[in-house]
Image: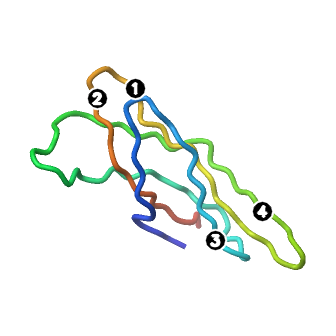
Amino acid sequence: MAFNNEGHFWLKNGESMWILRSVGGVGQGAQILQAMPQPFDTFPTPSGITQLESTRQQVRFQYSNGGTLWTYICLVENTYSPGWNATWFTLSGGGLS
């Protein structure tokens, strides 16, 4: 199942964070999660480069009293390079067929 522009996250140059996407009690099969940079909503808009890397794809399931919680997880890193920008991003992705 495809999804687009979920969440609203901020990363500085060289920082990383884990993103968790819980989908409830039904697994959605193999999923790819990808960080998608968002345009700045400021004026003037900063010029420069941002490079986001989405790695370490994981799936976690938790059993509890007759229910299951499925969570898809990935590590997002704003690649470090002097002078590169911090950025806002969302999460997009979907299943493999």
Q: Marks 3 and 2, Cα distance to the nearest angstrom?
A: 34 Å
x and y percentages locating residue 53 in the rendered image: 46, 40
Q: Is 96 on the left-hand or right-hand side of 85?
A: right
- The residue sitting at the bottom extreme is 66
- The residue sitting at the right extreme is 65
Query: Dot 4 corresponds to which residue?
Result: 61
Q: Residue at x 86, y 71 (%)?
A: 64
Which quadrant, please, contains the N terminus? bottom right
Within 10 Å of the Cα at label 1, are there few (<14), some (14-19), or many (20+) other Cα atoms? some
Give amino acid for label 4: Phe
Q: Marks 1 and 4, Cα distance to the nearest angstrom?
A: 32 Å
* Circle 4: element type: strand
Q: Marks 1 and 3, Cα distance to the nearest angstrom?
A: 31 Å
Q: Residue at x 20, y 33 (%)?
A: 48
Give amino acid for label 1: Tyr
* Circle 1: element type: loop
Give amino acid for label 2: Trp
Residues 84 and 30: in front is 84
Q: Name the mark on residue 80.
A: 1
Q: Is 89 on the left-hand or right-hand side of 47?
A: right
Of mark 3 and mark 2, the one earlier in the sequence is: 3
* Circle 3: element type: strand
Q: Are marks 4 and 3 in contact (CB under 8 Å)?
A: no
Q: Are marks 2 and 1 in contact (CB under 8 Å)?
A: yes
Q: Are marks 1 and 4 in contact (CB under 8 Å)?
A: no
x and y percentages locating residue 17 in the rendered image: 53, 42
Give amino acid for label 3: Val
